[in-house]
Amino acid sequence: MAQDLKSPTSARPDIHETKPRPLRHPSWWIGGAALSLFVVLFIRLLVTNENLHWDIVAQYLFSPEILAGLGRTLLLTFVAMIIGLAIGVVLAIMRLSKNPVFQTASWAWIWFFRGVPPLVQLIFWYNLALLIPTVSIGVPFGPELWSASMNSLITPFSAAVLGLALTESAYAAEMIRAGIQAINVGQTEAAATLGMTRSQTLRRIVLPQALKIVIPPIGNDTISMLKFTSLVSVLALPDLLYSAQMIYSRTYQTIPLLIVATIWYLVLSTILTLIEHYIEHRLNDGRPLELSLILSSLFRIKFGAPRTEVSK
């Protein structure tokens, strides 16, 4: 009899193993139906609209001209990001410095290049020869050792790199500064008390934690930089977009060539997103990146209190 009384109780599910189920609201079904209808109509447009000319899209998707523009877009993206991040690290260190001159100079740089649109910068750098016709290096009030025409130095590619990299440096500086300042200064003070050098503190304590904060916005910035490279078409630099424009200016197939460019931009953005997620998961799992070891050996940043000797 006692076993019969206990049997209903023992059959009850464990509250810790039971997952709550959300209450379905009628708006869920209405919104889901509307969204499904929109998706079906969009797919129908892609399949049935003859003006899209998918055969032409397939014809030019891997054409040598498009692939050359694709390679130039990737080159511009990574060169601009590397230069921008390198300058951004220096600017972030200057912002964190106690020297008011460094702080003011860094703030002015960030204020200017964050405020001027990238397109304006591209046009300005491309026309820099109107402001400075020649560049020369020599002894002050003495002989000239080297000189060159600005037109020969500022090509469409170099102007594009300058405009994109300098814009990125301003945003990267703020991201890196925020990542460094997010680390509790007590950790660096404790490391200094234990006798760790600045390089060890940076490599083992500050940088691994700061990377977790900085990597997501830098990944988003890289994807944004990939899209910003399309602005270089105003300089007649044959990137992915300008290559597509040159083709449809001859064939008058505007929409199919724009679809080709769109597909490649989506593919590259997806690859960069997967790389960003991989790096984030690797850092969250506690596995250090080789990048942290490289950066820590290149930059000696003073964090927290000065190093003190441990009494023996």
Image: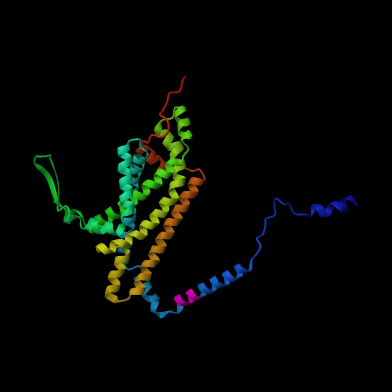
Badge count: 0
Residue at the image point whose x is 34% and y is 57% from the top? 74
Image coordinates of residue 70 in percent, x first then y, are: 33, 62
Q: Determine the main secondary structure of the stretch shown in magenta.
A: helix
- Visible residue check, residue 203: yes
Image coordinates of residue 260 in percent, x first then y, are: 37, 69
17 w.r.t. 47: above or below: above
Front residue of 128/116: it is 116
Front residue of 93/216: it is 93
Residue at the image point whose x is 32% and y is 65% from the top? 241
Whether residue 42 appears in magenta in the rendering, the answer is yes
Residue at the image point whose x is 32% and y is 59% from the top? 229
Image coordinates of residue 289 in percent, x first then y, are: 44, 44
Please tell me in which quadrant of the rendered image residue 295 appears: top left
Magenta region, residue range: 41-46
109 w.r.t. 271: above or below: above
